[in-house]
Image (cartoon, grey):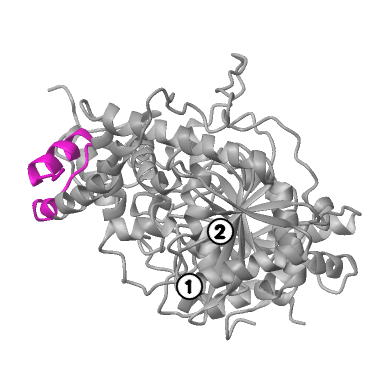
Amino acid sequence: MSWHARSIAELVTALERREISSVELTGHFLERISALNGALNALITVTADRALGDAAVADRRRAAGERGPLLGIPLIHKDIFCTDGVRTSCGSRMLDNFIAPYDATVVARLKAAGAVMLGKANMDEFAMGSSNETSYYGPVRNPWDLGKVPGGSSGGSAAAVAARLAPFSTGTDTGGSIRQPAALSGVTGIKPTYGRVSRYGMIAFASSLDQAGVFARSAADAAAALGAIAGFDPRDSTSVDAPVPDYAATLDAPLTGVRIGLVQEFAEALEPRNAALIAGALDVFRSLGAETTTVSLPSLPLSVPTYYVVAPAECSSNLSRFDGVRFGYRCADPRDLRDLYERSRGEGFGAEVKRRIMTGTYVLSAGYFDAYYLKAQKVRQLIADEFCTAFQRVDLLIGPTTPTPAFGIGAKIDDPVTMYLNDIYTIGANLAGLPAISAPCGFVDGLPMGVQLIGPHFAEGRLLNAVHRYQLATDWHARTAPGYA
Amino acid sequence: MSLTSRDVEKIANLARLGIDDQEKPVYASNLSKIVEFVDQLARAQTDGVTPMAHPLEGLTQRLRADDITETDDHEKYQRNAAAVQAGLYLVPKVIE
């Protein structure tokens, strides 16, 4: 079996048995990137020399007797994570010239674990988008159909794993930016509980919603990757100081008696072929011993409008730091300080980022704050309370990840609200700070679709366990886009 | 609620965001649709609901001890700035 078709555990075994070195493995993936990335545009920056150097270090560590579930395993970081000495663009012209002066905690932890960064993944500008079309570096193409989007905002990270350019990648999820592209690209993606993974060095979009996570080909691979990045970080004031369970150790736990609730509001008005896939996934979970039921969260349909007040509000505040003075794009020949601010921001940001900054500025402005921002934070609390009540009855919630499979490049980019509705099933988990995972569950029109599981706070282990058991019983996650096997 | 090009100008001014004149009607139309979309929140019954302060129930922002833990790396950080002199960021003249 080719190296890029193997699981992380299989690769680690091969490294341990000296069947391959990390330098050779890294070289293999770098060759795939140079052969395939031109058509996909999944990576903005390839760090080949650094990767081979890091791989040599990993080989020496292993030769010295060190072991580890990611030691010598290549990965790709979303270009939202600061990487010391490497351009960190966030998909924006604003940061096209930005060389990060330090590592994000996610990057530092994976480095410490011996994982080898191959490069930085393309993404929607400042993680604002659901199709990867808002990137300054151009759209990412879906490996299943190059005319289709891979989803977003972590589109490059998802497409890279789908095209087997790396065994795993990092991403961030503010309203679905890991789960939605995971679904549309046919890979497994997990968004942990808010506060589970440090946001230090992760360029901020909406700080009360942003959370880092991972893409991999299976829940088992995702468990190894998440285990390395999760945990308390004093540098992030919202990082939660709680022990990280051994996610790999609970992967195989039986699902007997686990209560899974289908979210009624998700199931209503679902396209019949999508509904059939979710019903099929429920059948599998029942066959594995789970008990299934239906749960109603009546305020959940308000999650998208709630999000499109809260997220732009936080974005308008966070992105005020880009002023053309300390870092990032600066306009040519500013007349005065005001002109410097306005033109640097006007020229440095793309259209979607400007829309969100202006939406946020509007909902926070005098006279509108109570009607929009405060109201949205109240509805957000209602939604969180309904999730909390639901988790008294069930262990996990289930539903689709997206309403449709991947859509055509250019199909929705001119209509912001239609684009926003792509995240109708994913946003609830962000509003309530809950962990959620998307896993491949079948195909519509030859394109992959995802099933989403949502758990109570800190139930990442249970989510990975449920999807791992599902993936032992099915092979949707093992399907590879034609030409990338 | 419908926003005009004039509203876009006001908002862009608050956000210090340069917007070309020909783009203003496009943003006005986009923002009107977004505002119309989020207006459905007004129908939600939220009497007596406390606005969410933190996504994790009962958790608040942690404080740290007031110790010096950072090193002085200003030269490294200022390499990303467009104009720096003697450790200071340069901007256009503010006072004539």
Q: Residue A220: x, y in percent?
A: 75, 61
Residue shown at 64%/46% (left/top)? A455
What chain letter is assigned to the residue under label 1?
A
N-terminal of the pair, mark 1 or mark 2, is 1
Q: Secondary structure at mark 1?
A: helix
Q: Is residue B66 above or below residue B14?
A: above
Which residue is at 48% across, 39% downward? Answer: A383
Q: Is residue A82 left or right of residue A245?
A: left
Of the pair B26 and A36, the residue shown nearer to us: B26
Few, some or many residues within 10 Å of mark 1 (<14, 14–19, 20+): few
Mark 2 crowdedness (10 Å alpha carbons): few <14, some 14-19, many ≥20: many
Query: In which quadrant of the rendered view does residue A125 lie?
Result: bottom left
Residue B67 placement (x, y as % from top left) = 61, 15
Magenta region, residue range: B1-25
Tell me the tag on residue A356: none
Q: Are marks 1 and 2 on the same chain?
A: yes
* Label 2 sits on residue: A399
Looking at the picture, which amino acid does disc 2 mark? Gly
Q: Is residue A185 above or below residue A213?
A: below
Q: Which mark is residue A272?
A: 1
Nearest the camera: A124 or A66? A124
Locate residue B23, reporting x and y percent: 14, 54
From the image, give the main secondary structure of the stretch colored magenta: helix
In this rendering, the count of numbered labels is 2
Compare residues A449 and A212 and report the one nearer the observer: A449
Kindly tell me whether residue A79 is visible in this rendering.
Answer: no
Which residue is drawn at the image coordinates 51% and 70% (left, top)? A274
The quarter in which the N terminus of chain A is drawn is bottom right
Looking at the rendered structure, the kind of residue marked 1 is Pro
Which residue lies at the image location 55% right of the left edge and 63% below the top edge? A182
Question: Farthest top residue?
Answer: B66
Q: Give the alpha-carbon distance from disc 1 to disc 2, as whole Å.
A: 13 Å
